[in-house]
Amino acid sequence: MAIDQEAIKEHIRGILIALGDDPQREGLSETPERVAKMYAEVFEGMNYTNHEIAEMFNKTFAIGDGEQDMVVVKDIDIFSYCEHHLALMYDMKVTVAYIPKGRVIGLSKIARIADMVGKRLQLQERIGRDIAEIMTEITGSEDVAVLISASHSCMTARGIKNTGAKTYTTTLRGRFQSEPELLARIKAY
C-alpha cells in the first residue's frame, strides 16, 4: 500500500477550512503539501507488513549453538501516533531482549525494527507485539521480551492534561513468560 499524498493534501485543506481558516493565506498555503510529506515519512511503516519488515532487516550472524547469553538493547528512542486520536506518543523508550537460538541479529537492526513498527497508526501494546513477532521471525528465537515506556499526548495535551503520566507495556514470549528472573535481569540493567 502506498501512502496517497495527493489525497492527504486535499483532506488537510478541508481540515483547515473546517477549522475556520483560509488554506490560501500566507503561512498556510504550503501546509497541505508539508503535512502530506511529513505523513509519508512518519507513517512509512504502514507500507509494510511485519513479515516485510522482517525481510527488510534480516541480517543475522551465526553463533555457537550452546550459547544462551541474553542480548538486551535498551533505550531505543522512537515515536508513534495513537490510532484513536492521531495523537503523538513521544519520549518512547523501547527495550528489546532475546535469547539467541544459534544466530544473533545485527544490533542496529533491532533499533530499525522498533523505529519502523512505530511508523504506523498504533497502540503501544501492539508496538511491543509487532517487535516481538518480527524478532522471532528473524532470529528463530521464541524467547523475546519488549518493554516500552511512553508519554501519550492524548493524555498530556488534551483530555485529562496530565503532563507527567507515562504508560508502560511489557510483551513477554517464551522463557521470559515462564522464568521471571529473566525479566528481573533486564530491569536491572
Image (spheres, rainbow, N blue to C red):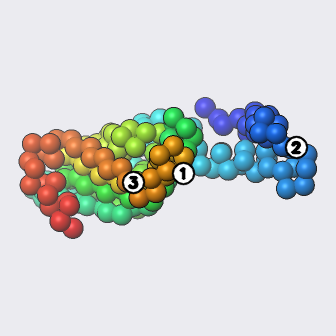
Residue shown at the point (19%, 49%) measured from the top left: 101
> Which of marks 3 and 2 precedes in the sequence?
2
Q: Residue at x 87, y 49 (%)?
A: 29
The x and y percentages for residue 160 are 47, 46
Q: Residue furthest bottom?
A: 189
* Residue 92 in view in this figure: no
Q: Which amino acid does the dot numbered 3 rest on? A: Ala
Q: Is residue 182 visible?
A: yes
Residue occupied by mark 2? 22
- The amino acid at mark 1 is Ala
Q: Which residue is mark 3?
A: 165
Secondary structure found at label 3: loop
- SS for tag 1? loop
What amino acid is at disc 2?
Asp
Quadrant in which the N terminus is drawn? top right
**Disc 2 vs disc 1: Cβ atoms closer than 8 Å?**
no
In the image, residue 38 sits, relative to residue 2, either above or below, namely below
* Element type at mark 2: loop
Across the whole image, how many numbered discs are drawn on residues?
3
Q: Nearer the viewer, mark 2 or mark 1?
A: 1
Residue at 36% over, 40% down: 125
Q: First in sequence: mark 2 or mark 1?
A: 2
> Could you say where residue 184 lies in the image, as x and y percent from the top left?
14, 58
CA distance for labels 2 and 1:
25 Å
Quadrant where the C terminus sits is: bottom left
Please give left or right for residue 128 compared with residue 145 in the image.
right
